[in-house]
Image (cartoon, rainbow, N blue to C red):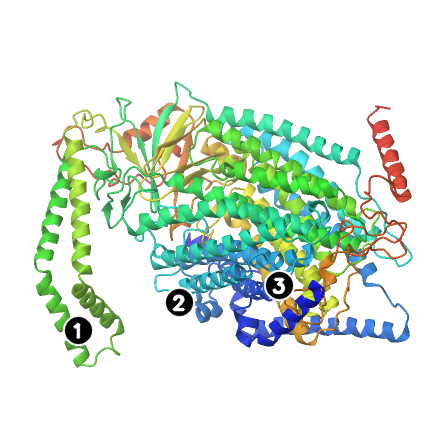
Amino acid sequence: MSTAALHAEHEAHHEHKESFISKYVFSMDHKMISKQFLITGIIMGMIGMIMSLLFRLQLAWPDDQFSIIEMLLGKWGVDGKLDPNFYMGLVTIHGTIMVFYVLTAGLSGTFSNLLIPLQVGARDMASPFMNMLSYWFFFMSSVVLLISVGVETGPASGGWTVYPPLSALDKAMPGSGLGMTLWLVAIVLFIVSSLLGGINYISTVLNQRTKGMSMNRMPLTIWAFFFTAVLGLLSFPVLLGAGLFLIFDRSFGTSFYLSDIYLEGVGALENIGGSPVLYQHLFWFLGHPEVYIILMPALGITSEVISNNARKPIFGYTAMIISLLGISFLSFIVWGHHMFITGMNPFLGSVFMILTLIIAVPSAVKAFNYLTTLWRGNLRFTPAMLFSIGLVSFFISGGLTGIYLGNAALDIQMHDSYFVVAHFHLVMGSAAIFGMFAGIYHWFPRMYGRMMNNTLGYFHFWITFITAYLVFFPMHFMGLAGVPRRYYQFTLVEDFDVWVDVNKLITVSAIIAGFAQLLFLYNFFISIFRGKKSAQNPWGANTLEWTSPIDVRLHGNWPGELPTVYRGPYEYSRPDREEDFFPQHIPDESAPEVLETEKSKKAPAEKEAEAETSVFFAAVKRVFGLG
Amino acid sequence: MAAADVVEAPQEFNPSAWDWNTILTLSLILLVILVIARAFDIGSLTEKISGKRIVSSHKINGWIAIVFLVLGLIGVWYEMVYHGKYVMVGNAASEHGATYDSMFMWTFGFTFVVFIVTEVLLFYFMFRYSYREDRKALYYFHNNKLEVIWTIVPAIVLTFLVLRGFNTWSKITSSDNEDAQEIEVFAYQFGWKARYAGADGKFGDNSFTFISGTNPLGLAVEGSVDELTQSLNDEIAALEALVASADDSAAVWKARLVNFEAQGRQRAYPEEYKKIREMAMDAESGAYVRGLEKEIKRKSTNVKRIAKFRADEKMFNKAGYDDKVVTEIVLVKNQPYVFKFRARDVIHSAYMPEFRAQMNCVPGMSTQFAFTPIKTTDEARAEKGNPEYDYYLYCNKICGAAHYNMKIKITVVDNQAQYESWLAQQAPVVAPVEAPAAPVAPEAPAAPETPAVAIN
């Protein structure tokens, strides 16, 4: 009796036992957990977006009253005018939600959970129970954070980085009271969730790969999730330490971050000997890798989607992995570029500047590789493909401004200006959210067995893409003109009057972008129930997730034996094949030695391509007079 | 400020109309989009039934990409022309500003070329290679030569930028000029003060423990510090009395609460009720006394620390009595300065964009920034064509509710004489002849809005 049959029997038994609770609530099936992460992430994303629209209204029309603000915020919006303290609270919670709850948990949690077992050919995560805990810690964390918005003294309001002493002293601002305590509790729960998930992702990738799935045949999505999990595992504990010290300072009278403070209305405090800058070091030791924890899964998804829809192998598979590895490594030693002007030793500043600018090299390699993948492809514009291309565009636009900000000298002027806001909203905000959308559109059939509506997807993409640029592009100019971020209004500085119109444009664009997300929500939820039934492999993809039955919900992913893998995931448009894709699990009839490498035999089309590139080189040589 | 408010009445999109009408309009727009989407679906359905392709969505998206590219480039150009002129480049008011601006232009040059080339290629490829059934993509998975090139070329460009940046950074941060005049800039929630050394050119010592209402910078001034000790001791005595009578007060609060509830006034006066209930609960649980004891401990620590410093004669050497604490910074053109920053409560950041200068002000840590102004306020006014124009130092690190309005004026004057006549008008920390024990409230004779020297 084969193991498959045994397993099938086990499965049948298992199915029989599943109750509603164990199937939908405390599920240990990675596919269900990924849906839980996704839905929670979408809800948090909507909340974060609505918050941003509220403070955008304030920035665009600081002298007007909005009944909607009073309706939604009550005492924080008396007479339809946003309270300055609550403005800070909104900014803080918007940042926290977007960075941690949407783009870390919502993106990584969803797609790592869905794709790691399915794409490496595993029946589930290494520890399904820990995986379930990971979601429920995340859920608790989200609930605590949302509760903190409603407390009497308002939510945490020191910015999403919550620098002490502002965040450590409840008399420094109202938001540093109970709201800040709850923020810290939420983040501690979040870190637990993230660590439980990360350990699982790493051990699944390392141990649970199916036969033939060597590391160098893994899809780039898996590589990206893998590096992301390693980054999270190494950096989140540091944030936990930073958070615990902050909790001690707040509640137990320690002085890790506090020294020489006199507070209006309180007097001189007892704390001496601490350093507020210590917190910044600890925070950014997580904070910088966190940027890549957000971005890398999006890049992985993009690699997969672009290759699949260009019907073309991803260009430079190995280079893509090495650049991911390089980015991961460098991300740990560049945190100081957030602190050039904290007063740290200028020599340290120069070291961080050099290390930071090196990151531009692997990033450039990635961008060029995406472009070359598109070159002479046969581009199918599914919504997922459009969002991936949008990501590449944002990655370039936002990445290039990083070269300004990573330069310590230029940072003197640009630090904490709107230029920074523009930079990170493009390169990690918009880019990562576009990666998430690409993932949702692409793997929706895999999750729900149905298709999303393409046309609505096109509208969603183009409106969001255009408005995102309209929102963030003008901000560069504001920043370069010296407009500081996190200002409640600009009317008190005459010099900033020229930006009133720009602020209005930004807010109107943001509102339109908000409405475009309603298209997505409608499309998403309607398609779950009423979408067109999906084919088994709707995108003609090579990877293993499309071999597991799409129409039945199966805990264990494959009914019989696990598929065996014969080649890498990006064999699209092979000249020797009739079809333009060649799934990983199908043995090559024409070549019995399935382990034959790509290098041993050059396909004719590649020669053609090399001929073309040599023409290119000849042209370059002629232009520069080298030939 | 009020005038500014009046001027910028909303123009095109009236937000006060942001009521149900607007919401309805926007919903209508949404509906139209949905209808168009439906129409597309019908189109694709017709295609399926008739078996004929009407128009491929791939082609449409390819065309939209080209339109986006063209409009996007026009948008970039528009922004460069219409908002680029506000960008602070080439008009720095400080000596190192020119170095800074040239660093900026080099970075801009490289990144702008890359930006245009890559974005054009991206959208052109979208258009050029959109899906056709009769075509097969090129099977092309790597080319070492190409990959090496686009690793090395960015690396070379970045090496150049790094070296240049390193030079600029070193030049800006290591300007330890002997002639530089020191000015202390003090940040607090929510404002700035500056301190100039008096005739002796020396700053008096200070400590955060000396800060009081009459001594906002915590300067070592005997009278003021003794007064503070006295008032702290008074406060401690008052708090101790409260602790002693805590049992009584607990009973009083409880009686009040019972009384309040008996009279059924909870609903009519919810605020008072909440307060009384909280006080009664705190009193009963002992939180009230613990709070008082914490206060006492804090204040007596402060008293002890003051006493320790007070014995230090070097600290109270009266060097700072002629210091001048002012609410406006006046600088002389071409004179090098070192700003020494101090923060009272939370982190602030001193941001002077016109001077290409910024430095955080961190409690418990002294930071500094050195620069030389090279353009007077009058020159800046003439350049901008705005006779009202002034330099400001803004707060650029989130510090609380009024963060957005925390600034101090910087005036750059043409020559030393103007500066000295301004400084002479400022009151010293302790008036020289009159009874030395009575400190003058430093900010009391608030500096005139525009100093006489700044007027032409």
Residue at which label 1 appears = B257
Q: Closer to the observer: label 2 or label 3? A: 3
Residue closest to the eye, B361 or B246? B246
- Under circle 3, the secondary element is helix
The residue lying at 29 percent from left, 37 percent from top is A273
Q: Could you say which disc has been placed on residue A298 in the image? A: none
Q: Amino acid at mark 2?
A: Val
Using a 10 Å C-alpha cutoff, classify the residue at mark 3 as few (fewer than 14 neighbours), some (14 to 19) or many (20 or more).
some
Label 3 belongs to which residue? A512
Pointer 2 residue? A78
Q: Residue at x 40, y 62 (%)?
A: A148
Can you give x and y, in whole percent of width and height, for residue B277 in the image? 21, 70
Badge 2 and badge 1 both on one subunit: no
Instruction: Give the distance between the C-alpha atoms of the residues marked 3 and 1, in whole angstroms.
Output: 53 Å
**Foreground disc of the pair 2, 1:** 1
Vertical arrangement, residue A279 with respect to residue A310, above or below: above
* Residue closer to the observer: B166 or A418: B166
The amino acid sitting under disc 1 is Leu
Disc 1 residue crowd, few under 14, some 14–19, many 20+, Cα 10 Å: many
Q: Earlier in the sequence, mark 2 or mark 3?
A: 2
- Could you tell me residue A26's position as x and y percent? 52, 69
Q: CA distance from mark 2 to mark 3?
A: 26 Å
Assign a secondary structure to mark 2: helix
The answer to whether residue A435 is left or right of residue A127 is right
Mark 2 burial class by Cα count in 10 Å: few <14, some 14-19, many 20+: some
Residue B24 x, y percent position in the rendering? 60, 75
Please name which of the two marks, 3 or 1, marks the residue nearer to the observer.
1
Which residue occupies 64% across, 70% down? A11
Q: Is residue B182 visible from the viewing direction of this image?
A: yes
- The amino acid on which the numbered mark 3 sits, given as a three-letter code, is Ile
The quarter of the picture where the N terminus of chain A appears is: bottom right
Mark 2 and mark 1 in contact? Answer it, CB < 8 Å: no
